[in-house]
Image (spheres, rainbow, N blue to C red):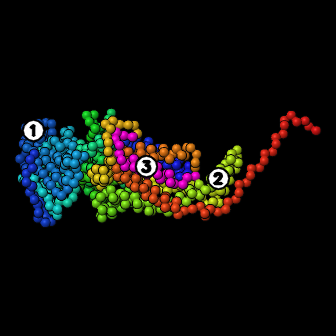
């Protein structure tokens, strides 16, 4: 490895290290729905007996009669989750995923505000009353408390809020047996001129519960977002002293709140009036509270308004999100859209999915992936190693040139250029494979940090390939290194050292010799806090590199070096005339 290669690697490593500092009730039997391909939906009879307005408390205006009632809960279970709906607000109070557990490997409720629920309609009446439907009690004709939806079935439940004759709000949930997506239909009747500004919001309040052990990492990967005009509008409540808010008008594809591995999104089917995002980091604990909302306009000249949406409360799985067809996969952070994201979406994930059809163990998939990358880059590595061997063979002549023209930089560069040209070598050829592989390495960093596929999948001593493979926890943190010892990075550092030792080099000075030891240490510091999957990948990449370099060293030679022109002796310097010489 020549000087230019090492300098390039050092600069890249420094950038990576600095970058990382800124990144660092009893259950009852369920009612089964087994009728094939049937949609079950009950009708809610309208309630026309509304108490007189004079008897209502004034806090909610004409909605006050609905602020008192009895809450009824409905548990809906399908293949992927168990959800709990409440008649108080016709809201979602619980969402427990079956295939994804928390860091203790137990089921957990994704909904943070499980007392009041997460979903609600929010608007202001012409009388100036602020209405949040979670404060109101809806009626429903469905009498069961639990229902299980079969794989090929659907189940719908309707909640109705009768404010006055011909004035009501109807909300219908539709569950599929084999999908995370939930249908959410709104019907507002008789409110054409009753809502201030003719506008209401459908909001998700409270964000999502943290599921991972590392709260700092969870906070770093939690934010709210909206997809508008083909781009992502992101709000991250990173500063505890600030309250964040973003409000924009226009058509939105979706709004969402996410944590590291899970997301709650609302997807409209028609044009929206805009979006509202708000966030605040709570002082009482490591949590960021987010509210996301879609704005809709109620036409003043129409008696009813209807909107159909989809709710997605589930894992951040690229294939599942992409299948929704609304660009919800954009919520995944794959780095730079113009560089690392294409590598993640079109190379890494497709290859992983293909290999996963035949191999269940993701550790083996990573090893095979590393081998494939080395196979693809073999021609580059071969050319690079041959170039460095030639550079090494040219060192005696280059040192002679440097000595003769040390006082003439222009001539020195000219002669060095001549030597490179006649020998057919590129002084930067040694670092070209490294530079070409850096986007892939960065893309893999993002994939391993954000993709749920590796989460809680183990390999060898690593229990979870999505977090560091710690074999010893200190209980305190060492600057730049961390609070634990991870084994994959240590093995990787050893492999990097061995790789450098057997790689031809054109430099023999003390500084370059020191880099053989410094660079592995830098890589160890960087990868100690990286996901174990990334450490495994780079370890195997270097192991395959060692084997590849050994083979090239055995088969490549410098016999094909052309005969080079001898070094031209530097012309003698003309003697200087003395200033005080006598004139003749």
> Which residue is label 2 attached to?
396
Q: In this view, does 274 lie to the left or right of 22?
A: left
Q: How far apart are marks 1 and 2 (CA)?
A: 99 Å
Q: Where is residue 442 in the image (x, y as percent from the top left)?
A: 41, 51
Identify the residue position indicated by label 1 in the image. 56
**Quadrant in the rendering for residue 64:** top left
Residues rendered magenta in the picture: 481-506
| Residue 579 visible somewhere in the drawing | yes
Q: Which of the pair 296/339 is nearer the observer?
A: 339
Q: Residue 169 in the image: x percent, y percent?
A: 15, 50
What residue would you read off at disc 3? 494
Give left or right: position of 447 versus 376.
left
Instruction: Name the N-terminal-most of marks 1 and 2.
Output: 1
Where disc 3 sits, the SS reads: helix
Disc 2, SS: helix
The answer to if 487 sits in the magenta stretch is: yes
């Amino acid at each position: 490895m020549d000087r230019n290669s090492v300098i390039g690697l050092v600069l890249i490593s420094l950038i990576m290290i600095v970058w990382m500092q800124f990144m660092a009730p009893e259950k009852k039997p369920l009612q089964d729905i087994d009728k094939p391909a049937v949609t079950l939906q009950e009708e809610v009879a309208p309630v026309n007996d509304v108490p007189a307005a004079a008897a209502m408390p004034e806090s909610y205006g004409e909605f006050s009669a609905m602020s008192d009632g009895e809450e009824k809960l409905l548990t809906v279970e399908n293949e992927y989750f168990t959800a709990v709906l409440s008649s108080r607000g016709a809201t979602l109070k619980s969402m427990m995923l079956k295939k994804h557990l928390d860091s203790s490997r137990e089921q957990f409720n994704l909904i943070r505000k499980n007392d009041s629920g997460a979903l609600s309609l929010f608007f202001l009446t012409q009388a100036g009353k602020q209405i949040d439907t979670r404060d109101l009690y809806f009626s429903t004709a469905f009498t069961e408390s639990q229902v299980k939806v079969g794989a090929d079935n659907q189940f719908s439940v309707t909640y109705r809020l009768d404010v006055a004759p011909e004035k009501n709000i109807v909300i219908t949930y539709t569950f599929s047996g084999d999908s995370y997506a939930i249908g959410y239909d709104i019907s507002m009747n008789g409110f054409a001129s009753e809502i201030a500004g003719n506008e209401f919001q459908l909001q998700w309040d409270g964000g999502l519960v943290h599921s991972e052990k590392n709260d700092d990492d969870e906070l770093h990967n939690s934010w709210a977002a909206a997809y508008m005009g083909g781009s992502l509008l992101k709000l991250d409540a990173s500063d505890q002293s600030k309250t964040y808010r973003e409000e924009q008008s226009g058509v939105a594809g979706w709004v969402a709140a996410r944590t590291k591995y899970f997301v709650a999104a609302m997807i409209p089917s028609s044009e929206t009036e805009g979006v509202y995002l708000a966030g605040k980091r709570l002082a009482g604990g490591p949590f960021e509270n987010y509210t996301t909302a879609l704005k809709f306009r109620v036409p003043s000249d129409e008696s009813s308004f209807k909107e159909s949406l989809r709710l997605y409360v589930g894992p951040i799985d690229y294939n599942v999100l992409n299948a929704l067809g609304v660009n919800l996969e954009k919520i995944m952070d794959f780095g730079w859209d113009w560089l690392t994201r294409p590598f993640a979406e079109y190379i890494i994930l497709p290859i992983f999915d293909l290999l996963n059809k035949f191999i269940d163990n993701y550790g083996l998939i990573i090893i095979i992936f590393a081998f494939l990358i080395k196979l693809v880059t073999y021609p580059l590595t071969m050319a690079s190693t041959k170039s460095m061997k030639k550079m090494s063979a040219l060192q005696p002549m280059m040192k002679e040139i440097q000595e003769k023209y040390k006082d003439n930089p222009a001539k020195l560069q000219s002669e060095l250029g001549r030597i490179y040209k006649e020998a057919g070598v590129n002084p930067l050829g040694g670092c070209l494979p490294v530079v070409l592989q850096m986007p892939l390495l960065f893309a893999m960093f993002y994939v391993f940090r954000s993709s749920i596929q590796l989460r809680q999948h183990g390999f060898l001593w690593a229990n979870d390939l999505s977090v560091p493979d710690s074999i010893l926890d200190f209980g305190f943190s060492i600057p730049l290194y961390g609070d634990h010892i991870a084994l994959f990075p240590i093995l990787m550092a050893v492999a990097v050292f061995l790789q450098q030792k057997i790689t031809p080099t054109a430099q023999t000075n003390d500084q370059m010799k020191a880099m053989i030891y410094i660079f592995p240490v830098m890589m160890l510091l960087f990868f100690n806090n990286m996901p174990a999957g990334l450490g495994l990948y780079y370890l195997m990449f270097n192991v395959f590199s060692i084997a590849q370099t050994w083979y090239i060293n055995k088969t490549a030679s410098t016999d094909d070096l052309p005969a080079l022109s001898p070094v031209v002796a530097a012309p003698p310097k003309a003697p200087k005339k003395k200033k005080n010489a006598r004139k003749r």
